[in-house]
Image (cartoon, rainbow, N blue to C red):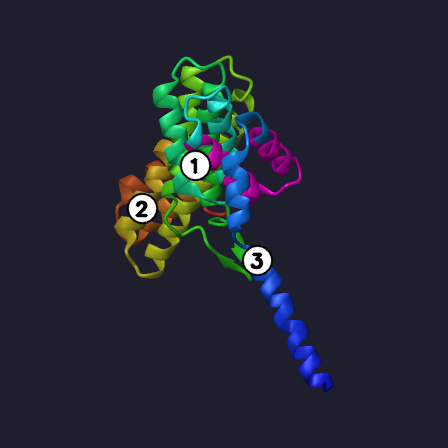
Amino acid sequence: MSKINKLYYVALALGLIGLSGCSSSPEEDVMLKNQSPEALYAQAKERMQLGNFNGATETLSALDSRYPFGPFSHQVQLDLIYTYYKTGKTDQAIATIDRFTRLNPNHSDVDYAYYMRGLVNMDVDKNLFQDLVGIDRSDRDPSHSRQAFEDFRTLIEKFPDSKYVADARQRMVYIKSQLAKHEIAIARYYMKRAAYVAAANRGQYVLEYYSDTPQLQEALEIMVECYDQLDLAELKDHALKTLKLNFPDSSYAG
């Protein structure tokens, strides 16, 4: 056999091995069906500990469907939420969370489900505000970030003593700053197109809803510039006074 043919068969064999690892075999399906809930859950936990979240999800899903009212049912659903989150299965994670919170409003770990809802929605937009090769991506729709903010707010309101509250508050601060950055990006977009009314409105929105973020100065500067372009002297003077009071070092304040 030539060297080229040998390489071909080696590559083919490796490809078949890779394909066999991508889906469960009939033997695996039979093994899942024949195992007790205790054995299945132990297998799922082991896979989670090893970082095999796809495999853990498969086992947990089988366990959840076969034993929906079994001894591990609640913990299985909570673990499923986590493995869906780790594998980027947003829709499945949200559906599982909503089902769990609806059916188990008094469960001792229901606060975890609310917390994970925020994390899942936040994860969808994890690259939304990052710079990619110098391109600011903050002009994309941040709807999931807004929902994550509301999810964390719900957690804090419903469970003020939860151990997840401190982290949720920090995440809300981060999200709020990014949402303000999003508004500024849109305002800059409008200014480039001489849509000064729309740009000023975005600055005003930041002033009203995100006044405790680092983007406040830029929002006020945008308002001053836009009102100047629109010859709205009274509005410009009001924005300028606010800018000088809060940011006396701004170039616009001089």
Q: Is residue 229 left or right of residue 100?
A: left
Q: Residue at x 35, y 45 (%)?
A: 223
Tags 1 and 3 touching, CB below 8 Å:
no
Indicate the quadrant containing the N terminus: top left, top right, bottom left or bottom right. Answer: bottom right
Q: Is residue 57 left or right of residue 150?
A: right
Task: Give residue 200's mark.
Answer: 2
Instruction: Find the magenta span and give its range.
Output: 40-65
Query: Tag 2: residue type?
Result: Ala
Label 2 environment density (alpha carbons within 10 Å; few <14, some 14–19, many ≥20): many
Q: Secondary structure at mark 1?
A: helix
Task: Give residue 208's mark.
Answer: none
Sequence order check: which comes first, mark 1 or mark 2?
1
Asked if residue 78 is positioned above or below residue 204 in the image, the reply reads above
Sequence order check: which comes first, mark 2 or mark 3?
3
Query: Tag 1: residue type?
Result: Ala
- Tell me which corner region of the image, top left, top right, bottom left or bottom right, holds residue 158: top left
